[in-house]
Amino acid sequence: MPNTSTQTRTHSRAGFFIVFFLMALHPEALLAGSLQGRLLDQDAGRPVSGAVLILSAPSGAVHSVRSDTTGSFRLENLSTGTWDLRVERLGYRPLQGHVQIGTAPTSVELHLQFLPMIMDELVVRARRDPEGKHIASFVETITLGSQRAPGADLAQTLDRATGVNIRRYGGLGSFSTLSIRGSTAEQVQVFLDGVPLNSAVGGGVDLGGLPIGGVESVDVYRGAVPARFGGNSLGGVVHIRTQPLGGKIRTRLHTASGSHGTRRLGASLSGPYKGWEYLGLVNYRASRNDFRFWDDNGTEYNAQDDGWARRLNSDFRGLRGLAKIGRSLGASRLQIHNTFDQSYKGIPGIGNNQSLHTRYDTWRHIAEAALFGPLGHGRAGYRLKAHHSREKDEYRDRHGEVGLGRQHDRNITQSLGLRGEVNVLLPGESLLTAFVAARHETFAPDDLLRPESRLLRSRRRALAVGTEVEVPLGQRLTLNAGTQAEGLDDRFFDRKYFAPSAVLPSRDNGEILWGYRMGAALDLGAGLALKAHNGRYQRAPNFFELFGDRGAVIGNTNLVSEEGRNWDLGLVFRSPSAELRSKPADGVGLGLAEVVYYRNRVEDLIRFMQNSQRVSRPYNMGRALLRGVETRVEARLLPRLALRGNYAYQRAENRTPFSFERGNDLPNAPRHRLNVRASLDLGRAEIYGEFSRESRHFLDRANLRTVPVRALYNLGGTVPLGEGIALSWELRNLTDNQVADLWGYPLPGRSYGVSVHYAAHQ
């Protein structure tokens, strides 16, 4: 028999050499440990989720992880030795230290100290008010990750929001405007990552020209407007948020195709690099938009010549580029982002009078730099921001197919803004916000057909100051109050004069706009909160309203500022059980319910009056009364069946002194709007159905030209194809309902869309 001890020694030597060889090649594979533990709030003792824990070794190796909802984290395959530890979480003071990693698992419990900070235009109150029950605003957040549909654009996505009314001039990329609670598009402020998109030029923010690529979520504020947005908004605020920085290396790819030649391609890459965080994104979208529509041939009351026709010269192409970088500078943070949008589209014309050559091209560039962080001993925070935007648009109608006469204009709008903001946590947990902002805008028109007309540059300077305070009275009642003042200094030229030798008369105008807002939120317990708000707002006429576009709009330099007084009262229920609002979930019941009544009065209302079929001019119409009821609900009827919907009744009443108009509905303000979405969770897949209904409304102030009742049905779903790959599909307008938001501008009928998403994490 062989010697057992000799065999044992032989095996031991072989094992030693194998271990030695493996250690020489990959020492970390054998001398590796792990780190696990929990992050807790130092004062409240609650778990801290979403915190970033970073380990750095002297060799240069870096590992990072985020804490989960229980505050737990775990890192594997760490080489033994001493690592530098850093923990970062918005709303908490950064934690730094060292940790010793051995071959055995290392467990730690870390405590973070609360610290108010400002991030991405949000004041973080993670410890005091995680559900927003103590904020007087009625705000709805639309997360596009769960609601993005193939072929849908930003306008179609926002059309599902409560109290929002979208008016579109056609298919993908067409001019689209937004109103909230019966307001005009001019009365709604739109922000992209905190940068205002509304300009002194005006005309409303064109949602059709804003790509959906890279957009993570959209906040829609109705009623009270937080101080960080300036506060002077009669209708409300829409805040568009792109993908945030942070986390591990992430790659996303997206492709979509659909009816009428619709296609979309997108790619993004984000992650950390040597202390920095970065995000890069490219998105391309295009469509022929050659959908068919029922053409009355311009004879509304003669059905003999009606028939199907194709939309002509309605094609669209758009490209977006987005770049973000950021890093921590001690307790502060620096963040820079740059957005570039370019679009080319045809202007199809009204109804059967379609154009064949009219084009409209836009080039937009937005850059912003922000520095924010704590002040003093952690009871105050600051934010400094500078932003610059430049937009160039070119309108070509050399054949006079659309608007008034032949045109070829190129306009350049530039804006430079600076803003400083301070947040202070006062005794009694009151929060004080103060800001000062300055903005300089220029508008440079260029008539390429008539260079001798010498269209001169106009400009607007604005300086705004404001403050807001949030005062908690006990554990349940919170009061909010704020005020702001904005000084305007305008210099523009009246473009009624186009003679080559004429001297264009300049006009200087100075004005101070001011407003206030007061609100209260009462926590009634069991998930119920009662909210109320009252405020006064003003809006100055913009360049578009003052002197038009020399096309379909004639300006009016005698306009004065609008003034509105708004108030609302509502009851909000949020289920204390988070499972009723998450996906997937085992709970069944009501997750969210909201009922709100509002009443807004507007003085010196600016509305466009149509002088002829193709030309309109703005006037101060006098007074309008906007009132209505908004309801919203989210519920889980079965463990895998979820229902979400909203219904809004609004009465937008013309209260001008003219007897033939007084009491009529304002244009483009339907009294009833209903949106319902039911989704069925099939495990890894999902299927959903949507229904929307809009009551009859009017296109003119005399309430003679109507848009009939419309009902739309959509069906869609998502199916996983593999690890990180998902297929989404949607059938829109199943009944092929022929609808139009505006007279002579039909919308697509039945259509489909298919998209594939890929997401990878490292």
Image (cartoon, rainbow, N blue to C red):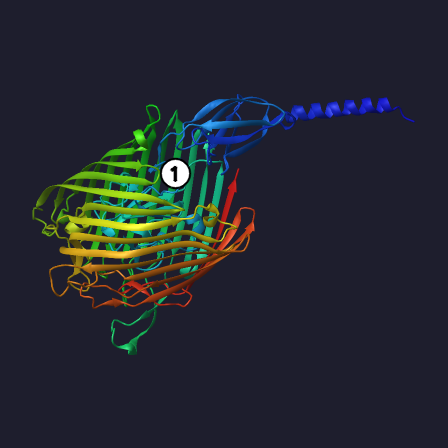
* Residue displayed at 46% across by 31% down: 45
The answer to which of 58 and 578 lies nearer the viewer is 578
Total labels: the figure holds 1
Q: In which quarter of the image is residue 552?
A: bottom left
Q: In which quarter of the image is the N terminus?
A: top right
Above-or-below relation of 242 to 755: above
Image-based side of 114 in relation to 423, left or right: right
Residue 654 seen in the current view: yes
Instruction: Residue 729 in the image: state x and y as whole percent.
Output: 47, 57
The answer to which of 228 and 718 lies nearer the viewer is 228
Disc 1 crowd, CA 10 A, few/some/many (<14, 14-19, 20+): some
Instruction: Residue 10 in the image: state x and y as whole percent.
Output: 81, 23
The answer to which of 224 and 118 lies nearer the viewer is 224
Above-or-below relation of 135 to 618: above
Above-or-below relation of 347 to 118: below
Image-based side of 327 in relation to 82, left or right: left
The residue under label 1 is 323
Instruction: Residue 281 in the image: state x and y as whole percent.
Output: 42, 42
Q: Residue furthest bottom?
A: 304
Residue 548 seen in the current view: no
Mark 1 residue type:
Ala
Q: Quadrant of residue 743?
A: bottom left
Instruction: Residue 87 in the image: state x and y as whole percent.
Output: 46, 28
Which type of secondary structure does the marked residue at label 1 adopt?
A: strand
Q: In which quarter of the image is residue 377?
A: top left
Image-based side of 158 in relation to 299, left or right: right
Q: Which residue lies furthest to the right in this view?
A: 1
